Amino acid sequence: MKEVYEVRMHGRAGQGAKSGSQLLAEAAFKEGKYIQSFPEYGSERRGAPTVSYTKIAEKVLKSHEPIVTPDVVMVLDFGIMRSILVAAGLPDTGILIVNTKVCSTEIKKLAQFNGTLYGVDATGISLELLGMDTPNVPMLGALVKLTGIVKMESLEYVLREHFLPKIGEEKVQKNISMLRRGYEEVFK
Amino acid sequence: MGVRKAITGAQAAAEAMRQINPDVVVAYPITPQTPIVEEFAKYVADGIVDTEMVPVESEHSAMSATVGAETAGARAMSATSSQGLALMWEVVAATPGLRLPIVMSLVNRALSAPINIHCDHSDVMGVTTVGWIQIFSENAQEVYENTLLAIRVAEDNRVQLPVMVNQDGFITSHAVEPVEIFDDALVQKFVGVRSLDRALLDVEHAKSVGPLVLPDYYFEFKRAQEEAMSKVFEVYHEVGTELSAITGKQYPFFETYRIDDAKAVVVVLNSAAGTAKAAVDAMRAQGKKVGLLKPILFRPFPYAEVREALKDIPVIGVLDRSMDFGACAPVYSEFRNALWELERRPAMQSYIYGLGGRDIMTTEIEAVFEELLSGKLDPEHQRYIGLRG
């Protein structure tokens, strides 16, 4: 693992980029890592493009700067790729994961990325299992499959810890299923 | 050892307040301070603390009610940011003269106009002359510990002055980081309860508070306030030593980072000091001798100690996150003042960065170090980091 592992999540306000970043950070924290997770705040309103950062390291994270050379970029809504260069700073060896049914020519063109592009139908999984479009959780499953940066059980633990008091056991189970489906269904 | 939690700077402030368990908390929501009071309100609602929370309609009322409660003898706290501080300014300025040891979280945010919700230090730098003790925090861990420290420094009988505990808006207040929360019982023993010997509601010892004082004695009141401020250093040191016994950390007036043989040093407050440490490490790895001085106690300002720490440094760059239009920037001014007494004064350069939340990157601070080492300075003018052309 490089000194600081950096994940940048692009989405639209309401899709859970901020919670997704935080869940990932907390899972790593549970495994004894040093972490930072923070969103970039604009004038937040549902639907506006958002970006959120997670840094994971073996030693104390001193710098508070945003992520400019990520290891992984996750895109929760491919539509934002029309206005934002999501792969900015992502090296060709990096990983780009997009919430999509297919890695279409259009997406590949919008991505402007020479490395490997992965897709996962996070919206489809989320609508099927939860009846709501919250793509962040299946996207995290895909991330674990591709990088192994945290363990699935750590993510499942923090999902339960966070959401049990808010949404109850049944929906926690559904979120865990969404996480596992994202893990299994990520494709090139 | 305490418990490690992944929480934000705002939650860290709320955790300290939970352990302090103040009698009264009065605040009005304002971004980015809101999550402190939001989190604390949950503790009140869940019965985890005994605090009386007073809902008010503005920051002016928030500080007025905090002052009222503290005068009565309660331990009262508040929190605000930017325009909120600006609106409560009248009461904020009265608090030190009333000798009320109120502790308030200030989540630093740019002042309007133009309106902006992001971090800079223009809010706090507008109140450094009114007599509050000012403490700055690099990260969520420091926010937590500084808040505990602040209560005891404020309430010490030699001091009896209010404290603002500063943290950077969003960068610290909204970022999740690991924070070690120390044992409730140990912290509560450290924090203790506020002594009631100055309480207005102590009817056995009647007194008046906030009287009209004309030219005959106003001057003497202010001189006494300065005396109290000068006592902060010894009290801060003593209280810090006591807190060390719980946390194992040191509580200096400022932190120095790799400055021993440094040829150039950067001075910067709050979260950017962390980013500067990363820049120092990167430069040191290339064999370049650079270091950092991070002010923590900014009021009172430890002139003698700063002078001693920097006396052998050839060149110093001071980074300010606010401006004093038409004059030297506030942090730069203090450091220039502190070094005046030296026979061989270091060369200095003033930099402005990060206004309205403009990011400050490690590479930008490395560029500052390169500039300082090259000797290409322009002390007559402040420079701007990351300003669009």
Image (cartoon, coloured by chain):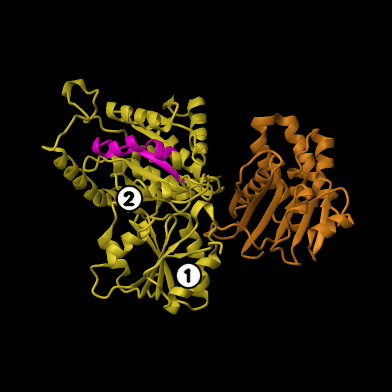
Q: In the rendered image, which quarter is residue A8 located in? A: bottom right
In the rendered image, residues at marks 2 and 1 fall on the same chain: yes
Distance, label 2 to label 1, CA atoms, is: 33 Å
Total tally of numbered discs in the picture: 2
Q: Is residue B118 left or right of residue A149?
A: left
| Badge 2: chain ID | B
Residue B198: % across, % down: 22, 31
Chain B tint as drawn: yellow
Check disc 1 and give the amino acid type. Answer: Val
At x 28%, y 44%, the residue is B131
Quick one: which chain is orange?
A: A
Q: Which residue in the structure is indicated by mark 2?
A: B240
Does B86 sit left or right of A130 as displayed? left
* Residue B180, percent from left and from top: 49, 47
Residue A58 lies left or right of residue A184; in this view the side is: left
Q: Quadrant of the C terminus of chain B?
A: bottom right
Which numbered disc covers residue B368? Answer: 1
Residue furthest to the left in view is B216
Q: Residue at x 31, y 27 (%)?
A: B68
User: Which region of the structure is painted magenta?
Assistant: B84-108
